[in-house]
Image (spheres, grey):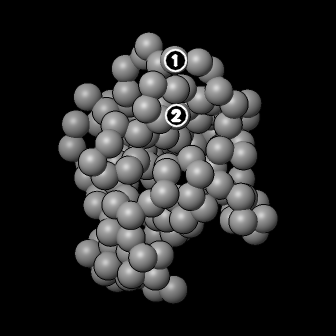
Amino acid sequence: MDYQDVPHWLLRTGARLDTTIFLSTDGLSPGFDYLVEVRGLDGLLDDPRAVEVLISFLTFKPSAKGVIPGVRGTTDRVALKRGEPCFARVGDRSFESREGLWLSELQKLQMSSRPMRALLEPLGPSTSSTATS
């Protein structure tokens, strides 16, 4: 699917996945290019649509080096950097992946209809700050 611009991508992807998607580049920590927030998910780590949003976004913006997906209206976030393990904070719980997580790993999840949680391991209560400022 061809997207001409960000508003077009936001509307088409949101409609296809029955969500509303918001994109920002403001207030991010170094190394992160975009904050992609989604309203309408049944959990950032448990809803396979979160994986679909990320795949669509990374295909639309292949030059992105760091992306933070989140659920709009919460502090739930995943910090993804190209080629590095990812870290997630959902509620008061923290998670991490053992290996780098990017487009090809997300596509494998999508093909098996599994959510992002399938690649993450719990770390315990969160004590670190989020990747957004």
From this viewpoint, is residue 54 visible?
Answer: no
* Vertical comparison of 7 with 127: above or below: below
Given residues 101 and 30, the one toward you in this image is 101
**Extreme-bottom residue of the structure:** 1
Q: Position of residue 19 (x, y in %)?
A: 38, 70
Residue 102, image x and y in percent? 62, 49
The numbered mark at residue 88 is 2
Which residue is the site of mark 1? 125
Left or right: 58 in relation to 121 = left
Decide if residue 105 is in sight here. yes
For residue 102, which numbered disc appears in the image? none
Between 30 and 124, the one nearer to me in the picture: 124
Q: Which residue sits at x=37%, y=20%?
A: 129
The quadrant in which the C terminus is found is top left
11, 1: nearer the viewer: 11
Q: Amino acid at mark 1?
A: Pro
Residue 31, relative to residue 17: is it above or below?
Answer: above
Q: Measured along the vertical axis of the image, is residue 18 above or below residue 52? A: below
In front: mark 1 or mark 2? 1
User: Which amino acid does the dot numbered 2 rest on?
Assistant: Ala
- Where residue 131 appears, as percent x and y from the top left, is 38, 30
Is disc 2 surrounded by few (<14), some (14 to 19) or many (20+) residues within 10 Å? many
Task: Say which residue appears at 47% left-offset and 35% top-offset.
Answer: 90
Q: Residue at x 65, y 55 (%)?
A: 115
Q: Is residue 51 toward the left or the right of residue 79 in the image? A: right
Instruction: Please tell me whether mark 1 sits on a helix, a strand or a loop.
Output: strand
C-beta proximity under 8 Å, tags 1 and 2 = no
